Image (spheres, rainbow, N blue to C red):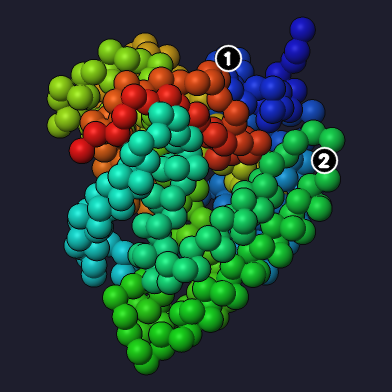
Amino acid sequence: MASADTLFRRITDYASRADPYPLYSELRRHRVARQAEGGYLVGTYHEVVGLFHDPRISSDRRNRTVQDPFFGNRPSTLVSFIGRDDPEHERLRTIAMRPFGPPHAPGRIDAMRAEIEGIAGELLDGLRGRDRIDLVDDFAYPLPVTVICRLLGVPREDEPRFHAWADTLIAGFDPTPGTDPAERQRAAEEARGAMGSYLGDLAESRRGHPTDDMLSAFVNDPGPSGGFTEVELMATAVLLLVAGHETTVNLIANGVLTLLRHPDVLEQLRGTPELMPRAVEELLRYDPPVQLLPQRTALTDIEVADVTIPKGTPVILVLAAGNRDPRRFKEPDRFDPTRPDNQHLGFGSGVHSCFGAPLARVEGQIALTALVHRLHDPRLLQDPPEYRRNPVLRGPRHLPLAVSGIGD
């Protein structure tokens, strides 16, 4: 019988990618599980939330005194603010937030609604006449990558360049047993550097020539707390571009897969479109795009659920396990778009809560609304579908569908 100290190995095994939830249930029974490789998994809702808000938990890998047995410790020259602690984290996040949302740019996301609806409509119009589509390649990927590129100010003709860079970066988080983490991280660092250099040069070209995009704002209106250094700007731009579309791809693809597995809910949303915002929140709980967070470190010995996590040790917060904790959510394995009090962990919590959550919510609502109403008789051609290898950002690599048509 498998033991608790192999849970991380089993969760990250590609054979578990289609349905890791039985393993998450096993993790919740232990609450905190020390792994044979050396780190600790935490998978119960209240313990995960507590650690999100615990100042003794660091997001900065420089505080790690134990070799990371899961993802390696290769240093990066481009570390974004999600990999730093306050006050450095707060300074960098404040600069990044200034052109993105309240209080300085309160209308940024709402102003993009019409543009996002237009992008979704154009993508679906382009699928007319086909009876089979790949939901990921044909819609779930191009929608958010187009949105984030326009938000940052990337020229349309350069958008395809980011696909390969992003795939290589995400592969750096793949702890597949028997593979070389150093090689994955070397390739990821090269991709991060290439993307960072491109975005840094693009931002610099806007200095003194402001345009209505975030890269321009970073160099022309940094705010009273000062601006980014060159390296900080590159790291932040890479974070926004990768996180701004990779998670939303999974939100849309996981969402369509879930709705097609629950045809009663699909019909309910067709008849009650105003329910979509709550349905997106339930999708973020039920099958979140970000399944776990691997980069936390204990700054001192910490006791969690009667287990002492030693100083300097890696701590992995398993958000998808916490999202189905029966001590927090009634009937947690049931998909219910009318679920009340749905304070899920899909966007994290605390000072490191997801920077792009408002945009992801809007994109998810617009994308799924368009798909629900315009795809005629959609049917899964493969269930479970082929999944991406990455266990952190979990979602289908392809989602082939049969359709009888694309409506107006």
Name the amino acid, label 1. Answer: Pro
Rendered residue at 63%/31% (across/down) = 41
Tell me: 344 left or right of 273: right
Q: Toward which corner of the image does residue 95 lie, by quadrant?
A: bottom left
Rendered residue at 67%/47% (across/down) = 171
Residue 273's spot in the image, x, y percent?
17, 30
Rendered residue at 28%/13% (across/down) = 264
Disc nearest the viewer among 2 and 1: 2
Residue 364's spot in the image, x, y percent?
33, 41
Q: Toward which corner of the image does residue 406 lie, by quadrant?
A: top left
Q: Say what secondary structure mark 2 lies in.
A: loop
Q: Identify the mark at residue 22; answer none if there is no mark.
A: 1
Does 7 appear above or below 112?
Answer: above
Q: Identify the mark at residue 36; answer none if there is no mark.
A: none
Q: How far apart are marks 2 and 1 (CA)?
A: 25 Å
Tell me: 247 left or right of 183: left
| Residue at image mark 2 | 179
Q: Looking at the rendering, in which quadrant would you find the N terminus?
A: top right
User: Which residue is more in the foreground, 143 or 237?
Assistant: 143
Callout 2 touching callout 1 (CB < 8 Å): no
Residue 204's spot in the image, x, y percent?
48, 85
User: Which residue is more in the foreground, 400 or 268?
Assistant: 400
